[in-house]
Amino acid sequence: MRDDIKYIARINKYCHEVLAFVEGYDFEQFLDDLKTNRASAATVEQIGETAKKIGIDLKSGYNHIPWRKIMGIRDVIARDYEGINWETVWQVIKGNIPELLTYTQEILNDINQQEENQ
């Protein structure tokens, strides 16, 4: 469970980072800024990679979270890094990452609550 907490905290941190990378950007600015789009894609890839390490017990306890989709985006980016669909990456960042940030915060809050009650 300790490793799972570490992984959830890491995903939470990655979500904050990728949202900070694109703050104030529109899609065209994102496309034009090579550092930002590459850093964002790599961070989204790391989110998926880290999600794969989370144990089944924690995942099943939060089955409303689309774990398979989270892990799958990593595979899409890693398989064809030169042919990344930047519109998909942008949609993930703007549409899914804020939701994932909420989910990871929910898990971290639940864990903190459990530790306080012990």
Image (tube, grey):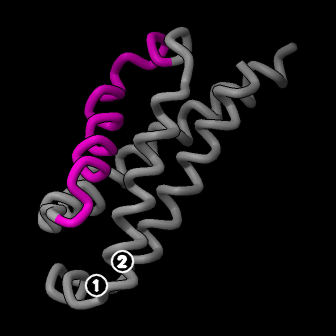
Q: Is residue 64 above or below residue 18?
A: above
Q: Residue at x 47, y 34 (%)?
A: 51
In this rendering, the answer to whether 7 lies above or below 27 is above
| Residue at screen point 15% across, 63% down | 83
**Residue placed most toward the observer, 116 or 55:** 55
Where in the figure is residue 98, as x and y percent of width and height?
37, 54
- Amino acid type at mark 2: Val
Q: Nearer the viewer, residue 97 or 115?
A: 97
Q: Are marks 2 and 1 in contact (CB under 8 Å)?
A: yes
Image spot of residue 15 (x, y percent): 47, 56
Q: Residue 26 location, x and y as percent?
A: 20, 83
Residue 25 is marked as 1
Q: How many dots with numbers?
A: 2
In the image, the segment drawn in magenta is 59-82
Q: Residues within 10 Å of mark 1 (few under 14, many from 20)?
A: few
Task: Name the dominant secondary structure of the magenta segment.
Answer: helix
Q: Residues within 10 Å of mark 2 (few under 14, many from 20)?
A: many
Q: Quadrant of residue 87?
A: bottom left
Mark sitting on residue 22: 2
Depicted 21 relative to depicted 112: above or below: below
Q: Secondary structure at mark 2?
A: loop
Locate residue 60 relative to residue 96 in the image: left or right: right
* Secondary-structure class at tag 1: loop
Work out whether 5 lies above or below 59.
below
